Image (tube, rainbow, N blue to C red):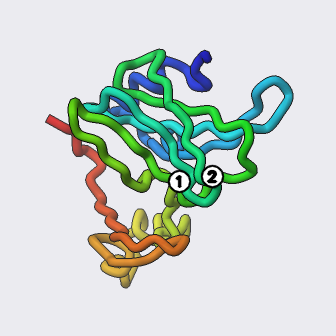
Amino acid sequence: MSSTIALEQIERIVGNQHQNPFEVLGPHLTEQGGKQTWVVRTYLPKADAAWVILPDVRKEYEMRNDQHPQFFEAIISDATEVANYQIRYKEGACEHVTYDPYAFKSPVMTDFDVHLFAEGNHQRIYEKMGAHPMSQNGIAGVYFAVWAPNARNA
């Protein structure tokens, strides 16, 4: 299987230089051989292997890391949707199962909020930034947003 994304995009994700990781990571509907199919991508810096789990249909799909050892991708051609999927991954002798944060698009920060914030006119930005417990698609979690345009990892 060849990757469905350019190596340059992968390198930007791995190097923490991508301006919009949602563009690359998470679930994406794509076309393979004239047929629409799902591809799920994740970046797991310490993982040795990874799988996508679709709990509703009780199926698991192996993720490949052909282009970079920590960038995983699974093509799922037999599912009409991949909502509420989980990622199972191995780190040495440990195994983890988690929901993919990139499967959840922000229901909180709208384009209008971004516009008002950029103008300096958002009067209730505290409702959009910071940590907010919430549930999306029946999955409980925490929505977290910060504004740090010059932040880089060490």
Marker disc for residue 82: 2
Q: Tell me if residue 90 comes above or below residue 100 in the rendering.
A: above
Q: Residues within 10 Å of mark 2 (few under 14, many from 20)?
A: many
Relative depth, front residue between 59 and 122: 59
In whole angstroms, how far apart are the C-alphas of marks 2 and 1? 6 Å
- Give the side of residue 10 with respect to residue 32, left or right: left
Marker disc for residue 85: 1
Residue at x-position 41% and y-position 28%: 71
- Give the side of residue 81 with respect to residue 71, left or right: right
Based on the displayed image, in which of its 4 quarters is residue 143 positioned?
A: bottom left
Q: Where is residue 152 in the image (x, y as percent from the top left)?
A: 22, 39
Count of marks, rendered view: 2
Q: Where is residue 122 in the image (x, y as percent from the top left)?
A: 40, 77
Residue extending furthest left? 154
Q: Tell me if residue 80 comes above or below residue 143 in the rendering.
A: above
Q: Position of residue 139 (x, y in %)?
A: 46, 71
Residue at x-position 22% and y-position 30%: 92
Give the amino acid type for the residue marked by disc 1 in the picture.
Tyr
Relative depth, front residue between 18 and 57: 57
Marker disc for residue 42: none
Residue at x-position 44% and y-position 38%: 42
- Give the side of residue 92 with respect to residue 20, left or right: left
> Which quadrant holds the C terminus?
top left
Residues tagged 2 and 1 counted as in contact (Cβ below 8 A): yes
Q: Position of residue 147 (x, y in %)?
A: 30, 59
Q: Tell me if residue 128 comes above or below residue 81 in the rendering.
A: below
Give the amino acid type for the residue marked by disc 2 in the picture.
Val
Residue extending furthest right? 34
> Which quadrant holds the N terminus?
top right
